[in-house]
Amino acid sequence: MGVMHMDEEEQLARERAKYFFEHDYHDRGMVKWQGFYLSDHVEDVEKYTNKRARAMEQQELKEMTTEEITQVLFDAYRNHQQVAYQLNRKDIKGMYSPVLKGKVNGYIDDEAFIGAQTVTIADINYVELID
């Protein structure tokens, strides 16, 4: 056998590939794509679940009186506990502010220092102690 030219090698490779696909190769059809579909589905479900959880967290919680709010904040400060609280605010879509969390570091007059935030007590809709 002599030296093959590039055209002859290419032609031979094409013929072998053609024979392989016509006689030996068995396409698995959609089975080969199911792994991709599954991961995409899991990702979509996770996004939906997170979006739904955020929406639930942004529903209006029971409105409390200023006295109730002040008492919970004082108890949290005295016992070095964290609180979960919601402000009396809505975004442009009408969603209530999310539930925020933080340790009550102190208060003065009509403001509480929760975590790194200074919050006007009158702006709090709901507050509760958390572990």
Image (cartoon, rainbow, N blue to C red):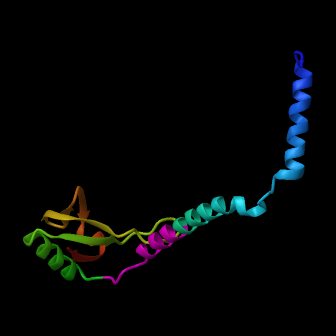
Task: Report the front residue among 29 and 112.
Answer: 29
Q: Based on the displayed image, in which of its 4 quarters is residue 129 positioned?
A: bottom left
Residue lying at the far top of the rendered structure:
3
The residue drawn where x is 14% and y is 72% is 76
The magenta stretch is 48-63
Is residue 92 in the magenta section?
Answer: no
Task: Answer with left or right where residue 50 lies relative to residue 23.
Answer: left
Task: Report the front residue among 131 and 112.
Answer: 131
In the rendering, at what x and y percent does residue 2 appear? Answer: 89, 16
Q: Main secondary structure of the magenta part?
A: helix
Task: Answer with left or right where residue 20 lies relative to residue 103.
Answer: right
Residue lying at the far front of the rendered structure:
1
The residue drawn where x is 26% and y is 76% is 127
In the rendering, at what x and y percent does residue 18 appear? Answer: 90, 43
Q: Where's the N terminus, which quadrant?
A: top right
Task: Report the front residue among 117 and 83.
Answer: 83
In the rendering, at what x and y percent does residue 103 appear? Answer: 19, 64
The residue drawn where x is 25% and y is 63% is 119
The residue drawn where x is 20% and y is 73% is 131
Is residue 58 in the magenta section?
Answer: yes
Number of numbered callouts drawn: 0
Q: Is residue 55 above or below residue 34?
A: below
Q: Is residue 131 above or below residue 104?
A: below
In the rendering, at what x and y percent does residue 65 appear? Answer: 25, 83
Residue lying at the far left of the rendered structure:
78
